[in-house]
């Protein structure tokens, strides 16, 4: 392979033979590393001029690659070059340049080789600059590895470094674009190992010259004219041990005029003293490249060297830009950060919420709120974060979330929802005065909002609990089909009419529920509860509508919580019409299928009646005894209920502490330390939450127990009375065929 050295002193190379290589160091003006002054390939103002001034790559806007080939017409002398620059965010760039210089000696295998590998970094707007000035400055630094081989006599590697500053005083449509640069090349000087008998250098080493390079670049007249130039001081800090020389001043200048945006002609005078003419062509948006520039420069060295020129020399260079610009990269990153990433985080939080993993959901929604405060769904994230805590019974944590959201999101359409959820928490905790106050706020501030009907529903429930049945009816009646609370509102409406003894209106409200189509298991359960209520209403009519009552009771499925009550209603209905066989079947179903039901004592009472009708007095007495015994055992002492409540109060302080910690962790980004704290909280939360759920289940049982306690005395009294009657009959006081019609009419389902 034949290579040449455009940047070296060719006379010394071509006159030096393999045997006299060492003499070349003493007799020739040695200028290694002069590629840093090479303006055939790049100049200040071009984005790949890393070796001219490392600060120049700060102006790079895309991934840019430049390749160049310098040759004599004979092809015996030449130089290759490749450079690539990659920008990061607005201000940072890295670059890599590779030079390959070399020459073969005619008639031998000896090769002169000088390669340079340069890695550089530039930053625009350095942090130490004042704000008004920082966006005009760029700072660059590079690290260079020199590979040197002089005909296999001298082989060496050396490391060096350049520093540079770029300054952009203005860039306007009126004045054009101006860049100024100063670079200290070889601020850290590479050292080249010398032959043992070299006459220059010290300790067998030669330092590659340190150069000062000042440059300017201007583009103006609507991008039609470019001017570029530099003045370099070569061997700025010359070492006297390396012979005479130093402080050589080398200028260069170039002008380019664009005949069209795609074609320009140029003329320049290089630092090596060549007058050059050339042309540049550029196109945009070709198939593979977003920008492609081709340059051809030509000269003849006899124009500057009269006696020993090599003739025609030429240089070809190609520059291409690929990939997105800085702004596009940053825009995409911002889009991901502001749009895609928060949406992904929000969807993940909603997935956890819908999977009923509420503690994890609260953390996930907290991440959305904390990490992406400008996300367009951040107010909804706050709402669902509060809902997650609500579903965990963490009412205080949920309150704090809603209160914070009301302060933060003053223009959000979620504000009435935050207020309603606060009202709903007050309702759940029995703080009716606070709930009423919040209801008035919603009515006054957001009378047309979607949550107004929800607030009416909760307020109607409170009125019902407070026995203000007219108030409950007024609030619940306007809630229409399609509303999520419709079925529940209709049930409370029906119960309000029952308490006002307006049974026709109550039956109408309940019938509306029976005609509706449930959308979830909760609504299906409410429909079956309503069927039982309609059964009771028809059972209690004068005269009783027993067939209709039985139809409603019979529509209740075994999976319903009211299944035992429906069976009891069926048993009573058949007792009323003197059909003890069917009645005993349903009563036995209560005993066998729902053995833990509080209605089992009454089922035994019914079985006693059925045996009495069949004149099986021994069985009748036995069932009445079972009814009395079980009624007494099923009752729960008030002291036991109070003890359970006191235990829950003891757990309350621990639960408050867990709530506080969970809320705090949900407001923090999931760093390893935060994740560790969350893992540590989980066992404590699970333990406390299990106790809370157990207590709530107990309260639901207490509601049934209280209802049972109201019937316990009646069951025991009826069982004892009928048992005495049976004993009297069995003892011979007389035979009875069964209860009279009047006695049957007095029996009532409870």
Image (spheres, grey):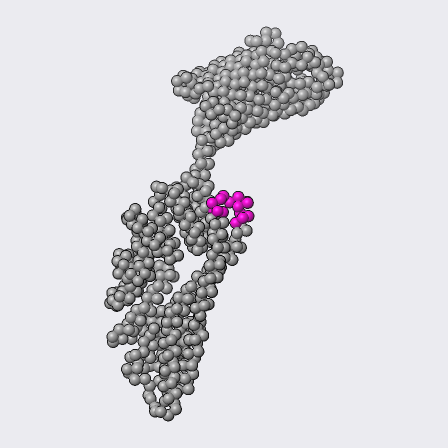
Give whichever of 85, 520 is nearer the camera. 520
**Quadrant housing residue 96:** top right
Is 82 placed left or right of 462 in the picture? right
Determine the residue positioned at 35% across, 81% down. 580
Determine the residue positioned at 44% across, 70% down. 637
Q: Is 669 contained in the magenta span?
A: yes
Q: Is 728 contained in the magenta span?
A: no
**Quadrant housing residue 468:** bottom left
Give whichever of 741, 640 is nearer the camera. 640
Determine the residue positioned at 42% across, 66% down. 701
Position above or below: 595 against 336: below
Position above or below: 444 against 507: above
Residue furthest to the right: 197
Observer able to see residue 253: yes
Q: Give percent across and percent down for residue 173.
A: 39, 20
Q: Give percent across and percent down for residue 689.
A: 48, 57
Q: Give percent across and percent down for residue 381.
A: 41, 46
Q: Give percent across and percent down for residue 728.
A: 37, 88
Image mark count? 0
Q: Which is the main secondary structure of the residues drawn in magenta?
A: helix
Is 487 placed left or right of 75 in the picture? left
Q: Quadrant of the N terminus?
A: top right
Observer able to see residue 109: no
Give whichever of 236, 661 is nearer the camera. 661
Determine the residue positioned at 54% across, 16% down. 214
Q: Quadrant of the C terminus?
A: bottom left
**Which region shows up in magenta?**
664-678
């Amino acid at each position: 392979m034949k290579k040449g050295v455009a940047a070296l002193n060719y006379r010394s190379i071509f006159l030096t033979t393999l045997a006299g290589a060492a003499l070349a160091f003493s007799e020739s003006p040695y200028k290694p590393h002069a590629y840093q002054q090479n303006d055939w390939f790049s100049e200040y103002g071009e984005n790949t001029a890393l070796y001219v001034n490392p600060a120049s790559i700060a102006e790079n806007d895309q991934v840019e690659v430049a390749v160049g080939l310098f040759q004599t017409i004979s092809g015996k002398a030449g130089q290759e070059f490749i450079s690539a620059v990659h920008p990061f965010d607005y201000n940072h760039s890295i670059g890599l340049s590779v030079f390959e210089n070399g020459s073969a000696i005619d008639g031998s295998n000896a090769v002169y080789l000088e390669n340079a590998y340069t890695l550089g970094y530039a930053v625009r707007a350095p942090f130490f600059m004042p704000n008004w000035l920082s966006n005009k400055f760029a700072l660059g630094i590079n690290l260079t590895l020199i590979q040197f081989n002089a005909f296999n006599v001298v082989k060496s590697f050396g490391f060096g470094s350049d520093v540079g500053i770029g300054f952009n005083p203005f860039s306007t449509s009126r004045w054009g674009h101006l860049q100024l640069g100063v670079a200290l090349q070889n601020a850290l000087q590479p050292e080249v190992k010398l032959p043992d008998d070299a006459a220059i250098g010290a300790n067998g080493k030669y330092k590659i010259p340190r150069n000062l390079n000042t440059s300017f670049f201007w583009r103006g007249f609507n991008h039609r004219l470019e001017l570029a130039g530099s003045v370099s001081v070569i061997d700025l800090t010359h070492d006297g041990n390396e012979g005479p020389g130093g402080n050589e001043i080398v200028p260069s200048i170039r002008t380019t005029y664009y005949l069209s945006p795609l074609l320009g002609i140029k003329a320049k005078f290089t630092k090596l003293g060549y007058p050059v003419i050339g042309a540049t062509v550029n196109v945009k948006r070709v198939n593979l490249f977003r920008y492609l520039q081709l340059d051809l420069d030509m000269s003849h060295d006899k124009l500057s060297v009269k006696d020993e020129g090599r003739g025609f020399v030429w240089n070809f260079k190609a520059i291409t830009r690929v990939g997105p610009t800085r702004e596009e990269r940053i825009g995409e990153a911002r889009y991901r950060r502001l749009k895609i990433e928060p949406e992904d985080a929000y969807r993940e939080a909603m997935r956890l919420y819908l999977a009923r993993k509420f503690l994890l959901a609260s953390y996930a929604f907290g991440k959305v709120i904390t990490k992406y405060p400008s996300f367009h769904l951040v107010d909804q994230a706050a709402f669902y974060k509060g809902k997650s805590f609500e579903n965990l019974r963490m009412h205080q944590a949920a309150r704090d979330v809603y209160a914070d959201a009301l302060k933060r999101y003053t223009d959000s359409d979620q504000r009435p929802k935050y207020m309603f959820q606060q009202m709903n928490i007050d309702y759940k905790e029995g703080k009716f005065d606070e709930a009423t106050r919040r209801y008035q706020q919603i009515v006054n501030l957001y009378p047309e909002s979607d949550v107004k009907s929800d607030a009416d529903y909760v307020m109607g429930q409170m009125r019902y609990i407070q026995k203000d049945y007219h108030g409950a009816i007024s609030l619940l009646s306007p809630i229409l089909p399609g509303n999520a609370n419709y079925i529940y509102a209709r049930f409370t409406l029906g119960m309000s009419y029952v308490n006002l003894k307006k049974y026709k209106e109550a039956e109408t409200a309940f019938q509306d529920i029976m005609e509706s189509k449930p959308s979830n298991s909760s609504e299906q359960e409410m429909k079956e509860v309503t069927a039982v209520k309609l059964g009771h209403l028809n059972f209690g009519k004068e005269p009783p509508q027993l067939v209709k009552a039985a139809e409603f009771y019979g529509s209740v499925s075994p999976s319903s919580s009211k299944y035992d009550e429906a069976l009891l209603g069926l048993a009573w209905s058949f007792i009323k019409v003197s059909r003890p066989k069917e009645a005993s079947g349903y009563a036995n179903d209560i005993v066998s299928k729902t053995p833990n039901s509080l209605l089992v004592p009454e089922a035994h009472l019914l079985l006693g009646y059925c045996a009495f009708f069949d004149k099986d007095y021994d069985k009748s007495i036995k069932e009445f005894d079972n009814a009395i015994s079980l009624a007494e055992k099923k009752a729960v002492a008030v002291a036991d209920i109070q003890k359970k409540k006191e235990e829950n109060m003891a757990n309350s302080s621990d639960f408050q502490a867990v709530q506080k910690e969970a809320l705090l962790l949900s407001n923090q980004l999931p760093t390893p330390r935060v994740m560790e704290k969350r893992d540590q909280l989980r066992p404590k939360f699970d333990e406390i939450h299990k106790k809370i759920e157990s207590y709530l289940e107990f309260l639901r049982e207490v509601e049934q127990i209280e209802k049972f306690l109201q019937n316990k005395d009646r069951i025991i009294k009826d069982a004892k009375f009928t048992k005495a009657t049976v004993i009297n009959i069995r003892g011979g006081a007389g035979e009875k065929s069964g209860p009279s019609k009047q006695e049957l009419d007095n029996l009532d389902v409870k």
